[in-house]
Amino acid sequence: MAPPPPRELLAVIEAALLGPAPPSPAQRVELLHAVRDAAPAFRSLLSYPGPKASDRTQVESKEVRLPDMPPITLDDTDVQTALKLSDELNLNEIECVRLLVDANREWVLYGREPLEIYRLAAGLWYMERRDLITSLYILLRSVVLDQGRDADLMFEIQNQMEALFSDGLRQRIITLVKELNREEPAGIGRPSSERYVLDFRGAIVERRAIVSRERLSLSHCLALSALIKLMSPKDVKDVFSILKDCAAEANENTSVELQITYGVLFSLVITFVSDALHTSHEKTSLSSYDSSFRHEFHDLVMRTGNNMTVEGFVGVVRLAWTIHLMLTQDRNSSRDTLTNASSRDMSDIWSCLEIICRQNAFEFLRERVLKTAAYQNDDEDIVYMYTAYTHKLMMCFLSHPTSRDKIKEIKEKAMTALSPYGPPRDRRENSGTSGEQIGQAANQPFTSLLELVREIYQKEPELVHGNEELWTFVIYAGEDHTNTQTLVAFLGLLSTLASSEVGAAKVYELLQGKTYRSVGWSTLFDCISIYEEKFKKSIQSSASMLPDFPEGDAQALVAYLAVLQKVVENGNPAERRKWFPDIEPLFKLLSYENVPPYLKGALRNSITAFIKVSPLLKDAIWSYLEQYDLPVVTAPLGHHTATQIYDMRFELNEVEARRESYPSTISFLRLVNALIAEERNISDKGRRFMGIFKFVYEDVFGLFPQRAYADPQEKWELALACLEHFHMVLSIYGVKDDDIYAAASASAPSSIESQLPVLELLKDFMSGKVAFRNVMNIILMGVDTLINERTTQTYGVLLEKTVHLSLDIFILIMERDLALADVFRPVYQPLDVILAQNHRHIIALLEFVRYDYLPQIQQCSIKIMGILSSRIVGLVQLLLKADVAKTVIEDYASCLEFRFDDFQVIENTKDDVGVLILQLLLDNICRPAPNITHLLLRFDVNGSIERTVLKPKSHYSCLKIILDNLEKVTKPDINAILHEFSFQLLYELCLDPLTCGPVMDLLSTKKYQFFSKHVGTIGVTALPKRNSNQSLRISMLHERAWLLKMLALALHVSDISSSVYREACLAILHHTFGHCVENFKSANLLHSPGTSTGIIDGSTHRNKMYWAARMGYGPELRRGLVGPRAGPRVLELLEVVQFRCPDTSMKCPQLLSNLRVESKIEEILRNPATSEFGGVYYYSERGDRLIDLDSFHEKLLQMSQELNSQLSESEKGELKDSFHHLLKWAWRYNKNLEEQAAQLHMLTGWSQIVEVAVSRRMSLLEDRSQLLFELLDASLSATTSPDCSVKMAYVLTNVALTCMAKLRDERFICPSGADSDAVTCLDIISAKQLSNAACNSLLFKLVMAIMRNESSETLRRRQYALLLSYFQYCRSILDSDVPPSVLRFVLLEEQDGDDDELAIQKVLREHNELARANFSIIRKEAQAVIDLVTRDAIHGSEAGKAISFYVLDTLISVDHDKYFLNQLQSRGILRSCLSDVTNYLSKDSSFSTESSQRFCTIEAQFSLLLRISHNYGKHGSQILLSMGALQNLSSCNLIGLQKKGHSRVISNIVKERSGEIDKKKSFVAPILRIVTSFTSLVDSADFLEVKNKIVREIVDFAKQHQSVFNSILRENLSGANLFTLERLNMVVYILSKVWSYEENEEFSYVQDLFSMMRYLFSLDFGSLNFMQSPNMIENQKSELIVFGLCFSLVSYLYFLATKKNMRFQVSDGHNGDQQQPTLQMVSDLLNSIALALERVGEEKYLLLNKIRDLNELSRKEVDEIIKVCMKQDCISPNDNIRKRRYIAMIDLCCMAGNRDQIITLLLQIAECSTIILLVHFHDEACAKDLSSFSDDLLPVLERLEHLKEDKVGRSLKLFHRSVTTLKEMTIRSMDL
């Protein structure tokens, strides 16, 4: 198999070997396959095909064929660039074309300059080389250094590496280290070659620097390889030769090249040491038993040269070779080898030892290797390996008998060669000592040896543990010191060995006086006491000058004090309290002028170590300082003391400044800083330390830049101590408003004691004074200078810390400056205003994001950017003007990419630079454009943001990094939080009005498609366990939440008329819900990224397995074995979020109850304030309110201090343990709260995508009803789970509501999937109804959800709404507007036989079964359900009451056997309803929110009352009547409801009040409906019982509300709306039923009815538009109501004529005042009805025919039908003809049903009219006057006789019989 591309190889290796967790089995297999496949690439490391004449000719022909690709056509620029790459990189021409293809895929080369294209392609080539070398390095490092890895895996890798080295890989590495440094195309390039390339971020990088980094990595590989397979003799000689070449240029070498030299050096050291110690895995040593090599290499090593630097490196190799000779000679001697060989070996060994000591190789190894900045800044693991083998080297040297003899010799020489008080070496040795000086005899080998051993264990203190050979040497080295230099070196070694707890204890014991005669603690303290006594006597003798302090003694004391400091610092906390009970002597020399400053510095440093021993000792140190140390004489800020005394100021300015060395001042600052940091009483806010602050502020830091420094390290130590003091002042002491106002109100300079250090420091920065200038000057050094100093100077680390503190101080200032500026303006300005006065200041602060040696500096720079971006509106313009915008963009992108690529898990997100950058981008989205987010994401900040065309592949930016990483989603265990905030950023960008367009356009492309593919990968991956990695669990939940919310937003706002957006939406739906209506092919998921035009049209398709692995797909998908899913992913997503919420209660541990502090803890936690305002809470970057553990800890410490005096020792210990548990509880509470919020967040995201897809994009999905059922079922199942919280249940119920609503809609939406465009009636009756079992399951789960233990009224309201929606869904299988008669007719036309009847009967039977099953399910839990609902209806909020009454209404509607009615009666809910209605309508309530909600409740109560009367018929009406319903309704203020709407007062009240009256007015209709229901009881009463109680009550009701009835009866019918017609119909119906029993004629109801008859009976009902309404649908409804009104009026006449024997005149009289109804009116009505019957029957007939022929109509004709029916909103332009025909058929059926209802009414009117006329014709008294009337009546009757049953759809036999009888009588009357 072909080797994988280097980038993919590196990704596989990093994922398996650098992750925080062991590799999974799949990763192991993938790693081993990748390493095996990459073996050829490793063997020929960085070996590429060279130029070839034939290939050059092919390129010049402008048509090139790459492997597995179609021919590629090149233009002139492509040819020139490819040939230039070939010439300058020594590459084959075809390979150069391949580079251009890959570069175009990566960056899009279109529109770029040729030089830029060349640099990008060359940079890509070097990136491939770097990836390959890095892969090799990680493999070697893992085998050598990762001892905790899987042993089997490491063994496999080691075997493969050994095979590679056997095949010549090491020789190739050696060759590359040597040849890459040559000025040739294969190396750093010719002098005329292009010197620069563009790296991965598009930044210009020098080619030489890239090659140097390659050589460095190769040198590391070379050193590591020596531990896997020992070098051959040839390899050793070659490496030694390269070492001398590298060392010869050491004086000119940069830090990187020095590190290369060290790599080559230690590869030899490791080889010799490991071979000598037999640490190699090989059984035999090639170098040990090859005598020729042994002699030859010994001769090489023993040769000396003139270059002392080369000699120094050779001396180190010579030392390692000597160790090798000694140990191998021991093995040879043990094997009885020849004596002459052994003697020669010993001679060689002694000759080596002699030259080693003569040239002092120990000094060179320490000074020129271990202590250099290059060594210290090398790779951490490599440095550890170097140091470890240096340790082994020295342990062999110190422990071997031969070398011991040499050590004894050089020790004796050192003791005799130096005078006991000779000139000591300076305590700070110059790191720049030349090579010639190294070999001088003044630097004794024994001293250098001690210092070398000290340096080794100073770097790796853990190597001391268990090292008995070292302690043996230490005991020997400490004996019989006769001079200062060896004593100082020995004590320095002891101070290093005391760097651990074990070492400190051992060193303490060594110096107790039992081991050494003259070296011990007593020597130290005795010496201090002697000199203190000597100086005291000198002062008492009045000597003019104090005696000088001997330099040698001072140096010895410094060394002793260093040991003391380390022993105290690292000693066991319990034991060290007993070691030094009296430290007062350490203070006694501090005040003497003649004591050297460096000795004072050592004294104070040792004193500082005692501060943390105990609080009592800390207080003692304060008192001793005040007693012995130099005073700090201070005056108010800005003033100076006139008297000159010897104090700290004098010593600084007069003593140390002249020496240009400041150890005393540095130690003093460190000491006071440590003391102040341990202070717990901060109530005075630092006033007592104001003198110290003034000294630091004015004398130390104020003059800091102007002083001269002999050692630059001291300069930064001094600055660091000052900045630590300032930082501590700003961190510890807070500033309140009272302090600010007090300082502002002070008119004169106040005393020092009254000043606040923090305020004075703030004032300085806010006015740009000395501290600000000095700190700013440190920052202005710039990031490049810092990088150079950090990598080349040993003090670079100090400078780095100084810059970090400076940046942190700026942040602390900007956190407090606004409050101060509000009071002190204009004298003091916010810091951003001060910075803005010089743009260089802002740029310098922001550029440190590029500094990657210390992440804390990057964090500070990013935080400063966040603060400045919120304050400076024109920050982007400032950066553009300064021409640094591009640099800032690339620096932030590089920082973010480095964080994404990092393998370190960062626990605290506040310290995560990636999170900080993403949070910065999020915070700036909504700020005025152009803002920092627009800049860093490469929007067009110079033009229109909303019109930007984002090109992440063309420009290196944070957007490119984010998109690339979200596309791959690698290292989820490390980068989950970055993925989370990245998805949130994209979501917010899609939501922002300015950025939504460009971002949506970008994300909708095929490359991304809103990352919908991750629904099936990261979306459904199992969450980690809470107890294993809760932080990762939380991040993964939020990550999925933002992904789902982004997908929901994309579905919501995408314009699917665009093919790109439509495809993206289909992708989202496919990955989330399953199959779509349109065929979305999953093969698109593995399309090659970055496909483009031009040169890359024939781009090579890489190995898809590797690419899929980078994309984050599982192994099944990578192998193409993914089968069909069992269900939609959306259900799997819901399963992910279904787990029990962690406990987030505020219940504290029970341990505190016994200590009587529980109430105080609860008081602290109840305070909602954040830590900035005295509370203990803070808001996380996600917006969660969490406990600030630091603030909480501080509160607990304060409480502990307050209680200490009241508690015993045992209680104190118990309190401490309790507080410890309390902090653990607080941490756990935070995590649990975050997880709960994350769980709810993901569920919210899930609900959004479900609701958006269901409500807006359902048409794009298949099998919609089944999907909706699955969503409903899953939501309800999750709601009933005991793990589901109330908040989660609320969200799930909302989803269920949406699904249920859509399910109702889906029932009558055109069925999809049919092959034909035709629509049949079966499509209407066989709607997409769920099966009865499914419905029953939903109802059962819904009832269980309602009855759940943990609930709330808000949740139940949503559940009640869902219950109502469910019953609406189940209420009717058929569309209620389509009558069965119409369906039967259409079915009869479509089918043969009785199939139509069977189909309808089956549907109705299933509907009845469902209704019975629903009732049965509800009845099982009836008691509990009704109890719960009635409780909400009575005691809930108004909104809860309203929907509860609607639920009761629904329960009544499905009631069987009056079960629920009895339940309601027994609970008195009906009487309560009547009472509430009466009370509400009887009072004049003012408009408010409460009254509006109350209105809804009353409306629901009316609905319940109406449902009782409607569902139970006369029985229900009788129940309501028996409860006094009519009396209650009679007492309602209907007059007010009706009249107030027309009163003059309305014109003077506010609109809200009139709206309230309009609402109450709407209650007239339900009241009338209830009264109408009571009229059904009138029909059951005996006709003769005129005074019937029911009739009397209804009549009384009508009388009491005469004005209301009159106003309704006198409404103008012309143009009346449906509401008016409905009320009129009910009033007329009521009066027609009961008013005929009333004999009192004082009311005008009769005349009003007669007047209405006169108007209505005269209308031409045969006309098509007699209602004159432009709305056809409304016209049909109005027509139905009008005919119902006519029927009521005719029924009234019928009652008068038949029951009361009233006879009507034939026509109107001439002198009657009252206009009575006449027979002519009835005849006119009959005639109009006949015409209407003909018209309506014909309309119905035409409609039915049109339904039958609908499938023959064209799309245009169907659209006209839809337009006429006003249903245009039901279709979209994309809907097919089948759906249009379906909608048209439904509308036509509804219209035919309306016609059918009208026909029924018309026939009833005609029958009543016929009977009225028959009564008059039968009455002989009236018949004689009907002859003329008969002439007009006869044509009407004849028209009625000609009505045909097929037109009206009714049987007309009885009707025709009545008409025939009337016709005969009419003819008979005509004959009279």
Image (cartoon, rainbow, N blue to C red):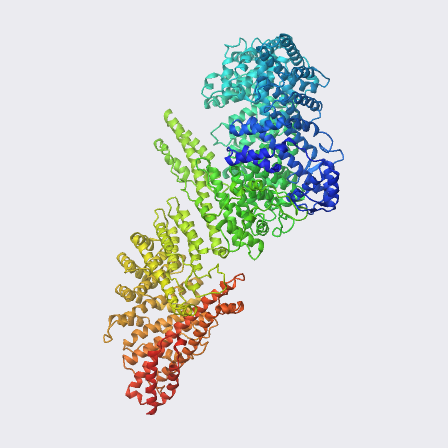
Image vertical order of residue 1518 relative to residue 932, above or below = below
Q: Nearer the viewer, residue 768 or 1058?
A: 1058
Task: Find residue 89 and report its horizontal and vertical position in percent.
Answer: 71, 36
Q: Is 665 situated left or right of 1478 in this image?
A: right
Q: Is residue 773 visible?
A: no
Q: Quadrant of residue 708?
A: top right
Q: Is residue 205 visible?
A: yes
Task: Find residue 658 and report its horizontal and vertical position in percent.
Answer: 66, 21
Task: Find residue 1191 and report its horizontal and vertical position in percent.
Answer: 46, 35
Q: Nearer the viewer, residue 985 or 325?
A: 325
Quadrant where the N terminus sits is top right
Q: Nearer the viewer, residue 230 or 7?
A: 230
Q: Quadrant of residue 1362?
A: bottom left
Task: Find residue 605 and report its horizontal and vertical position in percent.
Answer: 55, 21
Residue at the extreme right of the image, as rendered:
192
Image vertical order of residue 1804 relative to residue 618, above or below = below
Q: Nearer the viewer, residue 33 or 1190?
A: 33
Residue at the extreme front of the image, as rendered:
1393
Quadrant where the C terminus sits is bottom left
Q: Is 1662 situated left or right of 538 in this image?
A: left
Residue at the extreme bottom of the image, as rendered:
1872
Q: Is 721 situated left or right of 1799 in this image?
A: right
Q: Quadrant of residue 878?
A: top right
Count the numbered circles shown.
0
